[in-house]
Image (cartoon, helix red, strand yellow):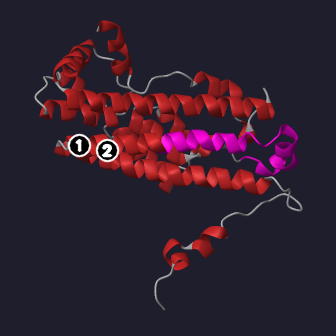
Amino acid sequence: MSLTYSSYLKVDELLQCQKPLSDGPEHDELLFIVIHQSYELWFKQMLHELDFLVCLFNAGERNRALHTLKRVDAIYRTLIQQVDILETLTPLEFLSFRNRLSTASGFQSFQFRELEFLYGAKDSRKLENYEPGSDHYLRLQKRLESPTLWDAFLNFLVKEGHPVPDSVLERDFSLVAEPSPAVQQILIDVYRNDPLVSEICEALVDIDTSLQQWRYRHVKMVERTIGSKIGTGGSSGVGYLQSTLFKAVFPDLWAIRSEF
């Protein structure tokens, strides 16, 4: 049989992945499942794009790196728009099936944790939410010990002839990278003398901004839906989410703003 739209995209299998657990089931549970499954698909695509971006940085591919950064930012803007759909779910509509979620929580999204580690928000304690030796645990452990997107960018700057200190390049990748005054001076020089690389810097800032906007919209959506209640799976809910707001992914790129 020739290849069809449905067989290529595995549509039949895909449409069997939405399994509401509530009695009836409740009308709004399907929306909740579809939105979160679509988030996971976009997380998969972002990891795919960002891993490719690391390869492009390592290869010194300036133009393709910039193109990929713009694509990732476009995906984030799509994620932000999807919050509009979730916000149509009223507190009572969510309550109609919330107890069925039991110990399940968005905090357990291993792909989102992978994205955090890739951006540099390293925290070995987050592995405690996964079974040691499981696929999810091993994927996160690998991300924890690997260079971040920022590390790849710094090595890209070296290839471009910028003198990034060895002390910045040869660090413990399992820890959060500290902002570097030496790197900030290099970035200022890049902005003044290298238009294309400075455009790449601005594209990184775009991603940082979009991620923070998505976090903010997500926090407000959760707050309007469950208020200050404990989150599903026993998480601290809105309190924890608020603590993640306005934390820059690329702090060196923000620090230089007042230096121009």
Specify whether residue 85 is painted magenta: yes
Left or right: 45 with respect to 256? right
The type of residue carrying mark 2 is His
Residue 67: mark in rendering = 2
Callout count = 2
Taking depth in this image into account, of 233 and 245 the one nearest to the observer is 245
* Image: 196 above or below 193: below
Could you tell me if the residues under marks 2 and 1 are in contact, i.e. CB atoms within 8 Å? yes
Residue 218: mark in rendering = none
Label 1, on which residue? 63
Residue at image coords 51%, 71%: 9
Residue 130, percent from left and from top: 56, 47
Residue 185, percent from left and from top: 22, 14
Residue 92 in view, yes or no: yes
Residue 251, by quadrant, is top left
Taking depth in this image into account, of 83 and 181 the one nearest to the observer is 83
Residue 232, by quadrant, is top right
- Alpha carbon separation for disc pair 2 and 1: 6 Å
Magenta segment: 75-103
The quarter of the image holding the C terminus is: top left
Specify whether residue 148 is painted magenta: no
Does dot 1 land on a helix, a strand or a loop? helix
